[in-house]
Amino acid sequence: MRTIDSLPAKKYYKIGEVCDLTGIKSHTLRYWETEFKLLKPHRANSKQRLYRKVDIENINLIKKFIQNDGLTIAGTKKALAKFNKSNKKTQKDYADFIHLIKSELIGIKNILT
C-alpha cells in the first residue's frame, strides 16, 4: 500500500491504483460511492472511474471510521457530517489567513516601489 505523497503527480488515478493505495477492494469502493455523497469520481469517456487525490483522502477517512473506529455506514455518515462541519471553520480560518498575508504582501510591495 503506497502513500498519497509517493504517487506520481497527476490529476486522476484509476480505480486499480486507488485500491492499491488504500487497501480497499474495487467492489467496496463502488458500493461506498452509492452510500457517501462525497465520493463522486470523475468519469472518462469510456465510463472509467477517475479519482483525484481529494477522493483518495476521503476514502482513507471513510476507511478509518469504518475499519479503525468500528462505525457502521450510518455512523460513518454522521461522523463525516461532524468532521465536515468542523473542517469548514478551519477552511474559513485558513482563507482569512491567506487574505491577510496577501494584504501584507501588497503593502510591502507598495513600500518597496
Image (cartoon, rainbow, N blue to C red):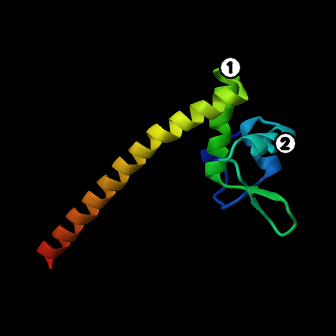
Vertical order, 47 against 87 (above or below): below
Q: Secondary structure at mark 1?
A: loop
Q: Residue at x 63, y 51 (%)?
A: 53
Q: Earlier in the sequence, mark 1 or mark 2?
A: 2
Q: Residue furthest top?
A: 70
Q: Secondary structure at mark 2?
A: helix
Vertical order, 70 against 88 (above or below): above
Q: Is residue 97 visible?
A: yes
Which label sits on residue 55? Answer: none
Q: Residue at x 73, y 55 (%)?
A: 41
Decide which of 2, 71 is in the foreground and name it. Answer: 71
Q: Quadrant of the N terminus?
A: top right
Relative image position of residue 7 (x, y in whole percent): 67, 50
Tell me if 57 is positioned left or right of 51 in this view: left
Relative image position of residue 90 (x, y in whole percent): 40, 43
Relative image position of residue 38 (x, y in whole percent): 65, 47
Q: Quadrant of the C terminus?
A: bottom left
Q: Is residue 64 visible?
A: no
Task: Give amino acid for label 2.
Answer: Ser
| Mark 2 surroundings: few (<14), some (14-19) or many (≥20) residues within 10 A | some
The residue under label 2 is 26
Q: Residue at x 76, y 35 (%)?
A: 23
Tell me if 86 is positioned left or right of 31 in this view: left
Q: Residue furthest left?
A: 111
Which label sits on residue 70? Answer: 1
What's the distance in space between the residues labelled 1 and 2, CA to CA?
21 Å
Q: Quadrant of residue 58?
A: top right
Vertical order, 10 against 23 (above or below): below
Tell me if 76 is positioned left or right of 14 in this view: left
| Mark 1 surroundings: few (<14), some (14-19) or many (≥20) residues within 10 A | few
Task: Give amino acid for label 1.
Answer: Gly
